[in-house]
Image: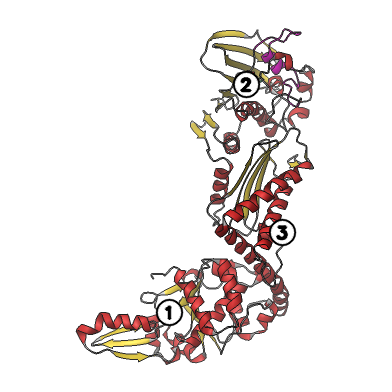
Amino acid sequence: MASYTAKDITVLEGLEPVRKRPGMYIGGVGAAGLHHLVWEVLDNAVDEAMNGFATTINVTLHEDGSSVTIADDGRGIPVDRHPTTKQSALEVIFTVLHAGGKFEPGSYKTAGGLHGVGASVVNALSTELRASVRRDGTLWEMAFRRGKPTGPLQKAGPARGTGTSVYFHPDPTIFPKVEFDPALIRERLEIVSFIHKGVKVSFDCRPEGTKDVFEHKEGLSDYLRKIVSARGARVVHEAPFVLEREASPRLDIALHWTESTDEHVRSYVNGIPTGSGGTHENGLRAGVGKAVRNYIDTHNLSPKGVTLTAEDIREGLTGVLSVFIEEPQFQGQTKDRLNNQELTSVVDGAVRPALEHWMNHNRSVAEAIVARIILAARAREASRAAQAEVTRKTATSGRLNLPGKLSDCTSANREETELFVVEGDSAGGSAKQGRDRGKQAILPLRGKVMNTEGMTLARVLENKELADLVTALGCGMGRNFDLSKLRYGRIVILADADSDGHHIATLLLTFLYRHLPQLVSAGRVFLAQPPLYRIDIGRDTYWALDDAHRDRLIAQHAKSRGTPEITRFKGLGEMMPKVLWETTLNPRTRRLLRVEIADPIVTDRVINELMGKDASARFRFIMDRAEDAEELDL
Ligand code: 0RA
């Protein structure tokens, strides 16, 4: 389309109906209807920007709080005269209902699909409206009162550049309260700047004395970053998935998987928020689901013993979706759900191949996402199994029955407390005597913990030791898991430094990782590091965690001060309570390893493969993980 002038404008009807029944055109005369006027004028400016003619939009809320100016640096509303009516195009746009040729073939595409009723409605409902246009070196002006011109379109002087500026004051005989909400306008303007990347949108709010400039080079991915950080969610991958389709319909998508347990998608149609979703959002969900499933199938990443649901795939998914279509149909109570059926397959068809391609070209990112999804599925499965168990338990006893062998601490301030899960009764005895009773609780486990890999929660809980542990933790499991009910700030696994102890630590970690993964990801699980050797050199005593550590200590200290005397501990039970305190329990002198899932997909696979094989292999894995873990300096 080379040019759009007065002859293209279709004349329909006058403005009387608008003043008679304003609700029909703007939805109502309350706050929403009032602000609708701003969105309407804003949409016209956004259209100019969207079509590449304007780069800047300036909105001013005047001192009175009830009048607004919206200016853009676009082509300027045409001022030439219509061949038959002899009116200027500008006059027609502001005085004739449905003028502007918005949805007609070959006409310019509108951003304001929901509104789309045009500037004339705003004019009809304003006591004063002034339009200024800079075009062809001239500044043109025309003023209106309640939709009617108060004078002709006039040359007001010379002008540089091009653009349109519209000032209006809503009619207080129509709107009971003419007072704009700066926060509402500001939010809308910022969203415009995200949806139309590169467009500079400023807001001069005179009543508040504030000035904002919104400009986003990265568009929706900038928006997504803001949403993700506002929600305080940890991200599963660094860069978001971004899809930008210029072709009709225009489509923009940015997605990010996070550690959050819910899904959060914001969608827009022609720049208007669709809070209740609709066909475009459905298409997004379908496309994401198919892309991820295809990726998992192609790369043989299907987990054993658990089926992935659509909800698992989208757990933690945060995203923004924006589409531009010619004739949007909205439905629902608040008219904020898109109903154009064709949009589902359009969005699905665009997202699926693009997301799959992105995953295949970002393998480590894709694996992290898949691991996140598998974890979601396992947590869901665990909760289902736990449901029955917990229901049964609470039915028999209303209050928490702490296990008899738990030596609890006295502090009620969870964040300063620790639960030491200790292998064996004799070790438990030393720990019980050596601990800080105020803040440290001890739960001794008798014998070996069973291997829970691949077990349902119900079976796991048949094991007394593990059931006691869950009871002591207090946070429940599976669907009933509630981190806020956790009774201790830290859960510390305390096992012998020998291979038997390693085996037990591995089994406990497997249990926690598989059945209480939230504790691990919340960073609440730790490994204590009891020494294996005591080394006396002269008057000094050193503690070594393993053979290598022992040799290093000897090399460092023995030369100068004589022969070292080395004692190997057979087990924690052998250690004097005081020694255990000093080396392993005392926060000032001990070192704990925080267990982190550095690479969940590897962890998932390795646990699967190693459980059932020999204990030393298992322990190597755990220690490898532990080295990835952050060491705490306490
Ligand atoms: C119709 C045709 C042309 C521009 C506009 C309308 C226009 C409308 C508004 C409303 C606010 N700002 C605006 N900027 C432009 C194109 C005229 C041409 O071909 O030059």
Instruction: Check disc 1: other Cα within 10 Å, few if <14, some if 14-19, many if 20+.
Output: many
- Describe residue 248's horizontal placement relative to residue 496 as left or right: right
Mark number, residue 168:
2
Q: Amino acid at mark 3?
A: Ala
Query: What secondary structure is found at the residue carrying circle 3?
Result: helix
Residue labelled with disc 1:
529
Q: CA distance from mark 2 to mark 3?
A: 49 Å
Q: Which sits in the foreground, 295 or 370?
A: 295
State whether residue 253 appears in this view: yes
Task: Identify which amino acid the numbered label 1 is placed on.
Answer: Gln
Magenta span includes 83: yes
Left/right of residue 519 with respect to residue 47 in the rendered view: left
* Label 3 CA crowd tier, 10 Å (few <14, some 14–19, many 20+): some
Image quadrant assignment for residue 66: top right
Given the image, on which type of amino acid does mark 2 rest?
Answer: Phe
Which label sits on residue 611?
none
Q: Does residue 470 lie above or below 404 as drawn? A: above
Q: Position of residue 537 (x, y in %)?
A: 26, 87
Q: In which image quadrant can residue 164 be found? A: top right
Query: What x and y, as percent, mark residue 328?
Result: 75, 36
Q: Nearer the viewer, mark 3 or mark 1?
A: 3
Of marks 2 and 1, the one in the foreground: 1
Residue marked by disc 3: 310
The type of colouring in the image is secondary structure
